Image (spheres, rainbow, N blue to C red):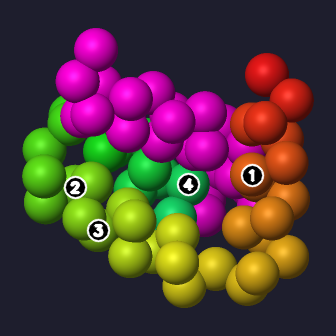
Amino acid sequence: MDDGAIDREAMGKMAKALLFIKGASDPTALALKLACDTGKPADIKKARALFLKLKPSERKGAMAMISED
C-alpha cells in the first residue's frame, strides 16, 4: 500500500472522529472527508492545514478515538 492510501484511510477515520466531536458542520471534518474521498493533493493539503489549526485538545481527542480502532 502506498503512502497516499494510508493517508486517505487515516483522514477518513479522523473525519469520523471530528464529526462526532465537533458536529456535522465542522469545516475541518468536512475537509478531511473530502480529502479522503477525492485523494486530490490540494484537498489533502487543505485538510492537513485545517487539522493543525484545531485546538490541541481537539486534535488529541480525535487521535485518541482513531487509535482505539
Pick whichever of labels 4 and 2 is earlier in the sequence: 4
- Going by the numbered disc 3, the residue's amino acid type is Lys
The reply to whether the magenta stretch includes residue 19 is: yes
Q: Which mark is residue 46?
A: 3
Q: Where's residue 4, x and y in %? A: 24, 34
- Give the Cα distance between marks 3 and 1: 18 Å
- Give the Cα distance between marks 1 and 4: 13 Å
Residue corresponding to mark 4? 29
- Give the Cα distance between marks 3 and 4: 11 Å
- Residue drawn at point x = 75 percent, y = 37 percent: 66
Residue corresponding to mark 2? 43
Q: Are marks 3 and 2 in contact (CB under 8 Å)?
A: yes
The answer to whether 27 is drawn above or below residue 18 in the figure is: below
Pick whichever of labels 1 and 4 is earlier in the sequence: 4
Q: Nearer the viewer, mark 3 or mark 1?
A: 1
Q: Which mark is residue 63?
A: 1
Q: Quadrant of residue 55?
A: bottom right
Q: Which residues are magenta?
A: 1-26
Q: Nearer the viewer, mark 1 or mark 4?
A: 1
Q: Where's residue 2, x and y in %? A: 23, 24
- Give the Cα distance between marks 3 and 2: 5 Å
Element under disc 1: helix
Instruction: Using the image as rendered, state which of residue 15 and residue 27 is in the foreground.
Output: 15
Instruction: Using the image as rendered, state which of residue 64 and residue 58 is in the foreground.
Output: 64
Is residue 49 among what the camera can see? yes
Q: Which mark is residue 36?
A: none
Q: Residues within 10 Å of mark 1 (few under 14, many from 20)?
A: some
Element under disc 3: helix
